[in-house]
Amino acid sequence: MSLTGNISDSDNERYEANLAKKCAEAEALLQEQEQKDQLERQVQKKAKLKERKRLEEEVQRKQEEEEFWCREEQRQRDLAHHLEADCIAAVEQQWQKNWMKTFHPPSSPPSDEEMNLLNYLPLTKRQRVQYLPQETPEARQ
C-alpha cells in the first residue's frame, strides 16, 4: 500500500507543479497583455492630445486671420472716410477762395482768364500716398 500511496503523492505533486506552472504562465501572459493595453492607451492619449493641440492651433490661426481682415477692413473704411473729408475740405476751401475772388478782388483786377481758372489746393500727404502713379504694363516692357 505504501507503493500506491507514493505514486499518488508524486502524481499529486506533479499535477500541482504543472498547475502552478500553467498558473504562472497565465499570470505572465495576463500581465504582458495589461502592459500592452496600457501602452496602447498611452499612445492613443498622446495622439488625442496632439490632435487637440493641432485643432487649437488651427482655430487660433483662423481667429488671427479673421482679426487681421477685420483690422484691414476698418483701415480701409478709415482711409475712405479721411479721403472724403479731405475732398470736402478742399472743395470748401476752394469755394471760399473763389467766393473771395468774386467779392474782394485784389488791387489790380484779374483778367477773365484768371477768374475762370480753378485754383486747386495741393494734395494732402494722405492723398499723395493714395494717388501715386501706378506702374503700367507698357512701362514694365
Image: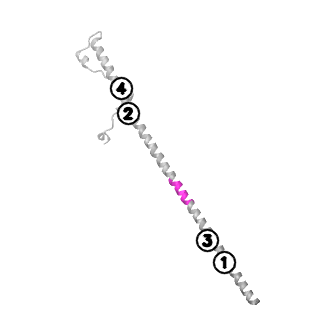
Query: Taking 60 as reference, is 18 left or right?
Result: right
Residue 47 is inside the magenta segment: yes
Residue annotated with mark 4 = 86
Q: Earlier in the sequence, mark 2 or mark 1?
A: 1
- What's the residue at 64%, 71% (across, down)? 27
Marks 1/3: CA–CA distance = 15 Å
Asked whether the beta carbons under mark 2 and mark 3 sit within 8 Å of each other, the answer is no
Residue 26, image x, y percentages: 63, 73
Q: Nearer the viewer, residue 138 or 122?
A: 122
Question: Which residue is painted at 29% across and 14% down in the image?
Answer: 101
Residue annotated with mark 3: 29
- The amino acid type of the residue labelled 4 equals Asp
Local SS, label 2: helix
Q: Nearer the viewer, mark 2 or mark 1?
A: 1
Q: Residues within 10 Å of mark 3 (few under 14, many from 20)?
A: few
* The C terminus, quarter of image: top left
Residue occupying image coordinates x 33% and y 26%: 87
